[in-house]
Image (cartoon, coloured by chain):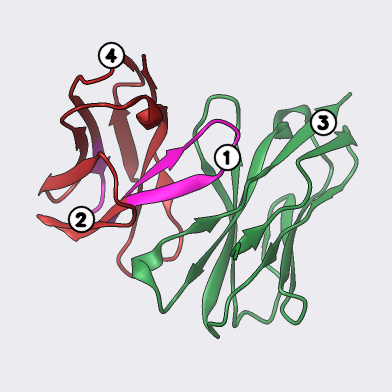
Chain colours: A red, B green
Amino acid sequence: SQTIHQWPATLVQPVGSPLSLECTVEGTSNPNLYWYRQAAGRGLQLLFYSVGIGQISSEVPQNLSASRPQDRQFILSSKKLLLSDSGFYLCAWRRTSGNEQFFGPGTRLTVL
Amino acid sequence: AQKITQTQPGMFVQEKEAVTLDCTYDTSDQSYGLFWYKQPSSGEMIFLIYQGSYDEQNATEGRYSLNFQKARKSANLVISASQLGDSAMYFCAMNERGSTLGRLYFGRGTQLTVWP
């Protein structure tokens, strides 16, 4: 069976500090991968998606970047965090030929 | 324009009763998919049910069913025999087959509370 992991689960960072959130998927190969952000009390906003190693597309211009160094690893980064980067970050995967997206447990980021 | 609209910020239902959560969508694509996800307080998004735009039958998964009315562009979730564990945030989502590789558009969600 497939599983998706995210870490850390929670993070408190000062403004201006760097960020690295990691997502890994097990039990499948060549998945489509997605990073979403959920602000408090809101729906999810797609940030990045990837169809393969090194292939990243951004949906929203912002302070964040993403990378996919391995087939089942997706990393969300920032060089300098802003207060507005606070939120709940969710990674998701989908089979190339599938419909459903399956989400990880999420990372709750607070920027102070 | 909003692609997914959920007009009920909160809903309350008594245990063992059925409840309907509303969702309307906006798309000009002929081929699309509709989804419902459950988000408990832990934050994880749990996939519940999927309906393809060409599916003639309404999707069902256990106690969940999707009332798909294509002409009205609605995709309401029906939960039968509610349980206390159903209390959570519920999100309706859509993807358009012609757009970005399965990207999902989400509504703002409905907070469901099941009381004993």
Q: Disc 3 to disc 4, how far (Cα)? A: 39 Å
Camera-side residue of A111 and A102: A111
The kind of secondary structure the magenta stretch mainly shows is strand
Q: What's the residue at 63%, 71% (across, down)?
A: B26
Q: Chain of mark 3?
A: B
Q: Chain of mark 1?
A: A
Magenta residue check for A69: no
Contact, mark 3 vs mark 4 (Cβ under 8 Å):
no
Q: Which amino acid type corresponds to the residue marked 3 in the rendered image?
A: Val
Coordinates of residue B81 in the picture (x, y in percent): 84, 42
Q: Disc 2 to disc 3, how far (Cα)? A: 39 Å
Q: Disc 4 to disc 1, how far (Cα)? A: 23 Å
Coordinates of residue A6 in the picture (x, y in percent): 31, 31
Q: Which residue is mark 1?
A: A42
Is residue B50 in sight in this rendering? yes
**Which one is in front in this view, the residue at disc 4 or the one at disc 1?**
4
Q: Which amino acid type corresponds to the residue marked 1 in the rendered image?
A: Arg
Q: Of label 1 and label 2, which has the lower sequence position? A: 2
- Splitting the image into 4 quarters, where does residue B114 fall? top right
Question: In the structure shown, which secondary structural element does the residue marked by tag 3 occupy?
Answer: strand
Q: Which residue is mark 3?
A: B114
Q: Which amino acid type corresponds to the residue marked 2 in the rendered image?
A: Ser
Q: Which residue is mark 2?
A: A29
Q: Of label 2 and label 4, which has the lower sequence position? A: 4
Q: Which residues are magenta?
A: A23-47
**Which one is in front in this view, the residue at disc 1 or the one at disc 2?**
1
Q: Disc 2 to disc 4, how far (Cα)? A: 36 Å
Q: Disc 1 to disc 2, how far (Cα)? A: 31 Å
Q: Which amino acid type corresponds to the residue marked 4 in the rendered image?
A: Pro
